[in-house]
Image (cartoon, grey):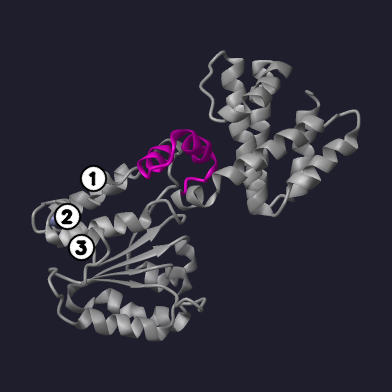
Amino acid sequence: MPLADIRGHERIIEVLRRSLRTGKTAHSYLFEGIPGCGRKKTALALIQAIFCKAGEDDACGACPSCRKVACGSHADIHTVEPLPDKRDISIDQLREMQRTLSLRPYEAPRKACIIEPAERMSVNAANSLLKTLEEPPGDALIILLTENAGMLLPTIRSRCQLIRFAPLSPEHLLTLLELNGMESGAASLLAPISGGSMQRALELDNESLAVRRDNVISRLGKMDINRIATVFDAAEALSGNREETLELLDLLLSLYRDAIHLAAGSHEIVNRTASAAIEAIAARSSLPRIMELLDDIYQTRKDVQRNANPKLALDHLFMNIAADA
Ligand SMILES: [Zn+2]
């Protein structure tokens, strides 16, 4: 995929294309971002552009080299990742990679290597990479992908050009899911709650998501502030570990955003199959009050992200929600 077709990272793409135009691409890059936000696609697009002889600052997408990169069969691209039954990338794998890079490329102007996830290199492996990053054999291009650059040795970081990828916006994610062939109803349900990750969106099974959403709606509907146990029970049932609670809060955000749309007289809602429940939320409260609750949910999400106890955070949030019921 040419760089021009990468969605959601316009500034990064512009920087990379400028460096291609001026012949100033780095030897080693460190792409930081959550899995599924487009780091690897961008890495491959950059390699494709460097390999392609037709384009100046991007790949043509049509020549034999571009087609091989696109279908993952280019002999000059190497990937290093943990072996199937191993947690870490070993020093042996890095040595093997260094040996491969020192060989003459088959057809590309230089070899390229993607290391993923870079934070899983053992300390020995990482140390053995330092020299390669400084003077890549045969002018090779090395791209490290990581979720968190802070988990890498400072000596690795300082030898790479760091590029930070933000999570995809719900709008970009929606477009990408649709381009990926997902039906637009399902895509619009998943896009806002997948944390900006294409991978996460594809993982979240749409059907189980709808079941989960209905369960959440039903629990919320049974809460009664005059019987406080119903509130705490709902929090108990719906909270989980941090990840699960954040997912629940994303779901609530998407429901309350829809409620705001309905309360404001717009029928553009994401959770169309739950419209009756959302109408009930919209009918219960005034628009300013729903906006307050949406704020509460945002705040709770922030608190949980910052290590607040998920159950206690939900207790508090649900009391606010139940006070309206
Ligand atoms: Zn090409």
Identified by mark 1, the residue type is Ala
Disc number lying in front (2 or 1)? 1
- Tell me, for residue 4, which label it has, or none: 1
Query: Which residue is painted at 43% across and 55% down in the image?
Result: 33
Provide residue 23's location: percent of width, then percent of height.
Answer: 13, 58
Which kind of residue does numbered mark 3 sit on?
Lys
> Rounded to the nearest whole Å, what is the CA distance between mark 2 and mark 3?
20 Å
Q: Quadrant of residue 277?
A: top right
Residue 175 part of the magenta segment: yes
Residue 90 in which image quadrant? bottom left
Question: How many discs appear?
Answer: 3
Q: Which mark is residue 68?
A: 3
Above or below, 316 relative to 267: below
- Above or below residue 295? Residue 309 is below
Within-10-Å neighbours for mark 3: few <14, some 14–19, many 20+: some
Whether residue 162 is visible to the viewer of this picture, yes or no, is: yes
Residue drawn 44% across the image and 72% down it? 153
- Residues packed near mark 2 inside 10 Å, few (<14), some (14 to 19) or many (20 plus): some
The x, y position of residue 14, in whole percent, is 24, 46
Front in this rendered view, residue 162 or 196: 196
Is label 1 or label 3 in front?
Answer: 3
At 26% from the left edge and 45% from the top edge, which residue is drawn?
A: 5
Residue in the foreground of this view, choosing between 292 and 230: 230
Spatial CA distance of label 1 from label 3 is: 18 Å
Residue that protrudes farthest toward the top in the picture:
265
Start-end of magenta stretch: 173-197
Q: Does the magenta portion include 317?
A: no
Q: Is residue 268 left or right of residue 320?
A: left
